[in-house]
Image (cartoon, grey):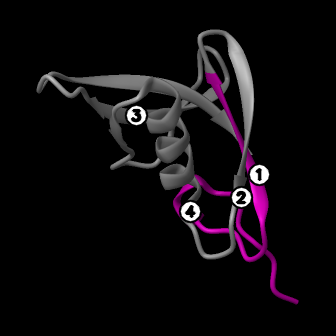
């Protein structure tokens, strides 16, 4: 029997799944189409909401203090500025 790994490095989901991310204190639900990396789906959703380019280069890391996963997303603004946003995620 084949089971999907829930480890953050797994990245893709066999069928459409969901990933949840928190932005400005509000949790958002993001569908993840088959064959799409879940962290890229979060970055694309952030890019659409924040009107900038967003890239999730690394998988999320676990914070033992808050007991939550955070995904580092690099935001590239139109005027050339970049910043890294740590986005809480769950799946």
For marks 1 and 2, the one nearer the N-term is 2
Q: Residue at x 15, y 22 (%)?
A: 81
Image x and y of residue 2, in percent: 81, 86
Relative to residue 3, is residue 6 drawn left or right? left
Q: Which residues are magenta?
A: 1-22
Q: Residue at x 64, y 15 (%)?
A: 66
* Residue sticking out furthest to the right: 1
Q: CA distance from mark 3 to mark 2?
A: 18 Å
Q: What kind of element bears circle 2?
A: loop
* Mark identifier at residue 8: none
For marks 4 and 1, the one nearer the N-term is 4
Query: Image quadrant for the N terminus?
Result: bottom right
Disc 4 to disc 1: CB gap under 8 Å: no
Image x and y of residue 45, in percent: 55, 40
Image x and y of residue 30, in percent: 70, 44
Mark 4 or 1, which is nearer the eye? Answer: 1
Mark 3 or 2, which is nearer the eye? Answer: 3
* Mark identifier at residue 18: 1
* Mark identifier at residue 11: 4
Counting other residues with Cα less than 10 Å from the Cα at mark 4, is it few (<14), some (14-19), or many (20 or more)? some
Q: CA distance from mark 3 to mark 4?
A: 14 Å
Relative to residue 1, is residue 63 drawn left or right? left
Relative to residue 33, is residue 1 drawn left or right? right
Disc 3 to disc 1: CB gap under 8 Å: no
* Mark identifier at residue 72: 3
Residue 73 included in the magenta stretch of the image = no
Residue underneath mark 2: 6
């Amino acid at each position: 029997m084949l089971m999907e790994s829930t480890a953050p490095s797994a990245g893709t989901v066999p069928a459409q799944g969901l990933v949840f991310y928190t932005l400005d204190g509000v949790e958002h639900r993001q569908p993840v189409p088959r064959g799409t990396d879940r962290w890229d789906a979060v970055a694309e959703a952030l890019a659409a909401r924040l009107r900038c380019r967003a890239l999730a280069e690394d998988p999320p890391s676990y914070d033992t203090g808050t007991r939550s996963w955070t995904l580092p997303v690099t935001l590239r603004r139109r005027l050339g500025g970049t910043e890294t946003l740590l986005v809480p995620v769950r799946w």
